[in-house]
Amino acid sequence: MKVVLAFALFASWVQLVLGAPAVAGLEKRDVFVPPVLYPHAGTVWSKGQRHNVTWDLSNAPVNITNSIGTILLRKGDLATPVVLAHGFNIRLGRIEVTVPWVVPDSDYSIVLFGDSGNFSPQFTINGPAIF
Ligand SMILES: *[C@@H]1O[C@H](CO)[C@@H](O)[C@H](O)[C@H]1NC(C)=O
Ligand SMILES: *[C@@H]1O[C@H](CO)[C@@H](O)[C@H](O)[C@H]1NC(C)=O
């Protein structure tokens, strides 16, 4: 799994930087990169709350190369090691996550991985008042 994820991260990086599908030989498969609908800009989450992360399935192809989804937390331009959800079917269109205990800030986003990564807009996570 770690290798797969690292590859997915690399592939999405290549895609971002080069603006092209990352790897020759994958282009015949149906790469499905659903846009994240929630959280969106303006979303505010608090530690411990549960929320449904949702994504748009309207362009989902019949056959998806990798239908097992993973959701990671990202802060600013950096991936964090926080896994919010893993092992769900990307065709669900939503998955419930628990807001982790992180430093409160307004530059969090989530990354949804199936075949490739897709970022949400940045949003806010409020923590407890100890910071
Ligand atoms: C997430 O969506 C499911 C299905 O619609 C619903 O049953 C559940 O209560 C939702 N969870 C939250 C935290 O809203
Ligand atoms: C989807 O996969 C099935 C089984 O491999 C295949 O029969 C079918 O033709 C594929 N459909 C598309 C649209 O690629």
Image (tube, rainbow, N blue to C red):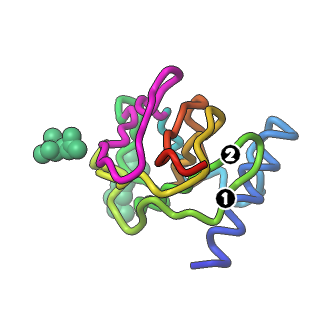
Q: Position of residue 49 (x, y in %)?
A: 32, 47
* Disc 2: CA contacts within 10 A as few (<14), some (14-19) or many (>=20): some
Q: Nearer the viewer, residue 116 or 120?
A: 120
Q: Nearer the viewer, residue 105 or 58?
A: 105
Residue 89 at x, y percent in the picture:
33, 59
The range drawn in magenta is 36-56
Amino acid type, callout 1: Thr
Q: Dot 1 corresponds to which residue? A: 80
Q: Which residue is disc 2 drawn over?
A: 75
Residue drawn at point x = 51 percent, y = 40 percent: 125
Image coordinates of residue 50 in percent, x first then y, are: 29, 48
Is disc 1 placed on a helix, strand or loop? Answer: strand
Quadrant housing residue 94: top left
Image quarter for ligand 2: bottom left
Query: Residue placed farthest to the front in the image?
Result: 130
Q: Do residues under tags 2 and 1 come within 8 Å of each other at their CB atoms?
A: yes
* For residue 77, side relative to residue 71 (left or right): right
Q: Residues within 10 Å of mark 1 (few under 14, many from 20)?
A: few
